[in-house]
C-alpha cells in the first residue's frame, strides 16, 4: 500500500543517516490508512500527516538524543488516539556520540 511504501522510505532514511533500526507498530499503519479513506484528500493525507505531525516530532526527538550525546540503535513508531505519534527509542548503554 501507499502507507507501507511511505513508512518504508522513512525507515530507510533513518537507517541510512542515523543507523537506526525502525520497527513500525500496526497502530501507525492503521491510523495512516484510515486517514487515506477520507474522500476529500485520499492518499495525499499520508504525506500531510508524515510531514506535519510525524517527521517534526521524530526530528525533535533525534536532536534531543544527539544533544545528550546518546545514540539510539532502534526506534519503534506507533500511534495513540489520545497522544498521536508515539516514539520509543532504544538507547543501548554505552552508545554515546563522541564529542567534536
Image: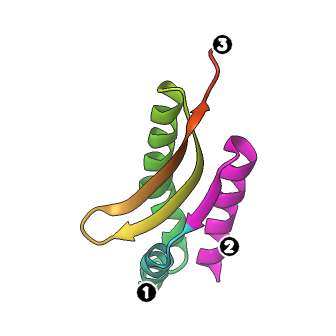
Q: Is residue 42 above or below residue 14?
A: below
Q: Which mark is residue 39?
A: 1
For mark 3, give the secondary structure: loop
For the C terminus, the quadrant is top right
**Coordinates of residue 81 in the picture (x, y in percent):** 29, 72
**Coordinates of residue 24 in the picture (x, y in percent):** 55, 69
For mark 2, give the secondary structure: helix
In this rendering, would 17 be left or right of 96?
right
For this rendering, which residue is in front, 77 or 60?
77
Q: Earlier in the sequence, mark 3 or mark 1?
A: 1
Residue at label 3? 100
Q: Which mark is residue 65?
A: none
Q: Residue at x 51, y 55 (%)?
A: 51
Measured Cα–Cα span from mark 2 to mark 1:
21 Å
Q: Residue at x 48, y 71 (%)?
A: 45
**Residue 33 magenta-highlighted:** no
For the N terminus, the quadrant is bottom right
**Coordinates of residue 63 in the picture (x, y in percent):** 50, 34
Q: Is residue 33 above or below residue 80?
A: below
What range of the chain is rendered magenta? 1-23
Furthest residue to the top?
100
Amino acid at each position: 500500500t501507499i502507507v507501507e511504501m511511505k513508512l518504508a522510505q522513512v525507515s530507510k532514511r533513518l537507517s541510512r543517516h542515523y543507523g537506526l533500526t525502525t520497527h513500525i507498530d500496526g497502530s501507525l499503519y492503521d491510523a495512516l490508512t484510515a486517514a487515506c479513506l477520507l474522500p476529500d484528500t485520499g492518499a495525499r493525507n499520508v504525506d500531510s500527516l508524515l510531514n506535519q505531525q510525524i517527521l517534526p516530532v521524530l526530528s525533535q526527538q533525534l536532536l534531543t538524543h544527539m544533544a545528550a550525546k546518546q545514540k539510539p540503535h532502534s526506534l519503534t513508531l506507533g500511534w495513540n488516539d489520545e497522544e498521536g505519534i508515539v516514539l520509543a527509542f532504544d538507547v543501548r548503554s554505552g552508545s554515546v556520540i563522541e564529542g567534536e
